[in-house]
Image (cartoon, helix red, strand yellow):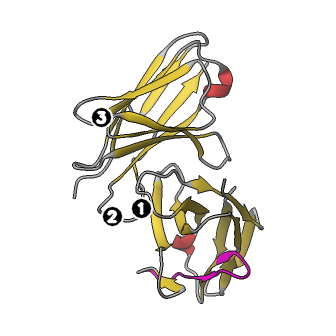
Amino acid sequence: AQSVTQLDSQVPVFEEAPVELRCNYSSSVSVYLFWYVQYPNQGLQLLLKYLSGSTLVESINGFEAEFNKSQTSFHLRKPSVHISDTAEYFCAVKKSGGSNYKLTFGKGTLLTVNP
Amino acid sequence: AAGVIQSPRHLIKEKRETATLKCYPIPRHDTVYWYQQGPGQDPQFLISFYEKMQSDKGSIPDRFSAQQFSDYHSELNMSSLELGDSALYFCASSSRTITGELFFGEGSRLTVL
């Protein structure tokens, strides 16, 4: 089975500051890794994913995450956050190789960007 | 582009009543997943269907059942509702041609009074 640990339940930052949301995973098999974002009263939107290849993946809105196999981590970073980045961020993992394997989510990190 | 459609978006029921949630996956997606997200909680996997057969089962109560129909839409049936069933229920779909990614619907918010 796979599991995900998000080390911070809440991260408050000021606008234009850098931010890192931490995610560690546990699995005995190869995995795919994801970050999903959930804005208040909305569904889950995929932010970025790591399947294979380059360990650094980027989203279109400035977030990036780096897969570190030795540390079993997939931390999410942004060099300068905006008020609109305020949301809940979920790290998720699924077994690789099968298209129908379920996602397992972490507990989530609430990012609050203050002016 | 078409997304995952869930209905109803909001549902209010009394204790011990029954509720049915529907999910219409993205066309040509072959797998449907159901998740339950309680207030302030992470989404918990309930059950999934691959090509209309149950493929995995998570923390779905015995009072709940689900199925996937020939047109690939899925329904989650919840009976003997309890206050603790109040949650946001997400449906997601995936396709073997798009590696790894699950596409989520906007969710159905169930309130049990």
Span colored in magenta: A61-74
Q: Which residue is mark 2?
A: B98
Please provide percent x and percent y for residue A49: 48, 72
The chain identifier of the residue carrying mark 2 reads B
Q: Are marks 1 and 2 in contact (CB under 8 Å)?
A: yes
- At horizontal 22% and vertical 50% (from top left) the residue drawn is B28
| Residue type for callout 1 | Glu
Amino acid type shown at disc 3: His
Q: Is residue A62 visible?
A: no
Report which residue position mark 1 lands on.
Answer: B101
Q: Are marks 3 and 2 in contact (CB under 8 Å)?
A: no
Indicate the secondary structure of the residue bearing disc 3.
loop
Q: Residue at x 46, y 63 (%)?
A: A97
Judged left or right of residue A28, residue B71 is left
Q: SS for tag 2?
A: loop
- Element under label 1? loop
Asked whether the residues under marks 1 and 3 belong to the same chain, the reply is yes
Dot 2, how many residues are within 10 Å of its Cα: few (below 14), some (14-19), or many (20+)?
few
Tell me the residue that label 3 is attached to: B73
Disc 1 chain ID: B
Specify whether residue A98 is in view. Answer: yes
